[in-house]
Image (cartoon, rainbow, N blue to C red):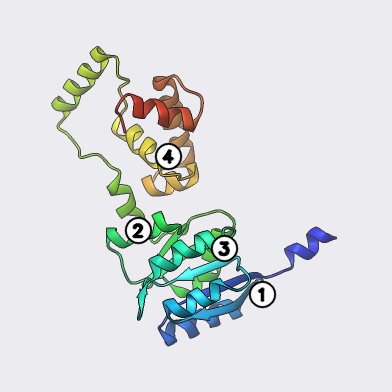
Amino acid sequence: MNMEAASSTPLKVALVEDDAAFQQAFRNALAAAPDLAMVGVAATVAEARAMLGEAPCDVLVVDLGLPDGSGVDIIGEAHIRWPGCAIMVATTFADERHVIASIEAGASGYLLKDSPLPTIAEDIRVLHAGGSPISPRIARQVLMRFRPDEKPAEEGAVDAEAAEKSGIPSLSEREKETLQLITRGFSFEEIAELMGVSRNTVLTFVRRIYAKLEVRSKTEAVFEARAYGLL
């Protein structure tokens, strides 16, 4: 009975956004979702900080461009003051600096405002369930950040031969991409989405990495890769 009661309790959602039109569109989208409840809105950094002094929400959606400061600061403070709250960005900023700063501050999702707002309810559900809703343009940007520069085939062959002679395990470019994303804390499902492959393909990369590094876990793989200078 308690489990049924818990499942029927709407998720508490708060929004930090200074654009009145977006605020209203956000309210309308959530109003059509009985499992989501809009419990707070802040239009400035100051208002957001005041809201963080209240009871925590389940999900916090934050714009980055606020009239009195940056939403990144709010993400960092919310991550500390509301540790159980899932945080997602909804913004017009698509540059790498804002994306990485938001993720490092504690955001688990990053949506651009050119994404269809009617999907926000499902994005919130995915975020709260442990997923990371990311606009395709942002996902590609994150992936490219960790993709090593491609080398000519001959140069790659020479590098692999040198690595073999030195005793350093030789990882393919895709295996290196997978390992880099693992170090950033992405799940196998999220890595599959970022790399544009299936989860099974990611697991194949992981098995190869484990075999080459002679490890049995993500933690050991990251440790050994750093020891070999692969990261």
- Label 1: few (<14), some or many (≥20) within 10 Å? few
Question: What mark, if any, has residue 34 been given in the picture?
Answer: 1
Percent position of residue 87, x then y: 50, 63
Answer yes or no: do the residues labelled 3 and 2 have beta carbons within 8 Å?
A: no
**Which quarter of the rendering shows the C terminus?**
top left
Q: Nearer the viewer, mark 2 or mark 4?
A: 2
Which residue in the structure is indicated by mark 4?
182
- Is residue 123 left or right of 6 when viewed as pictured? left
Residue type, numbered disc 3: Trp
Answer yes or no: do the residues labelled 3 and 1 have beta carbons within 8 Å?
A: no
Label 1, secondary structure: give it. Answer: loop
What is the number of callouts on the image? 4
Question: What mark, if any, has residue 82 been given in the picture?
Answer: 3
Could you give the CA–CA distance between mark 3 and mark 2, rounded to whole angstroms? Answer: 19 Å
Question: What mark, if any, has residue 101 been given in the picture?
Answer: 2
Residue type, numbered disc 4: Ile
Which badge, 2 or 1, comes first in the chain's sequence?
1
Which badge, 3 or 2, comes first in the chain's sequence?
3
Give the answer, above or below, for where 201 lies relative to 139: above
Write down the quadrant of residue 229 in the picture: top left
Question: What mark, if any, has residue 141 been given in the picture?
Answer: none
Which badge, 4 or 1, comes first in the chain's sequence?
1
Percent position of residue 176, x then y: 33, 34
Could you give the CA–CA distance between mark 2 and mark 1, rounded to whole angstroms? Answer: 33 Å
Residue type, numbered disc 1: Pro
Answer yes or no: do the residues labelled 3 and 4 have beta carbons within 8 Å?
A: no
Which badge, 2 or 4, comes first in the chain's sequence?
2
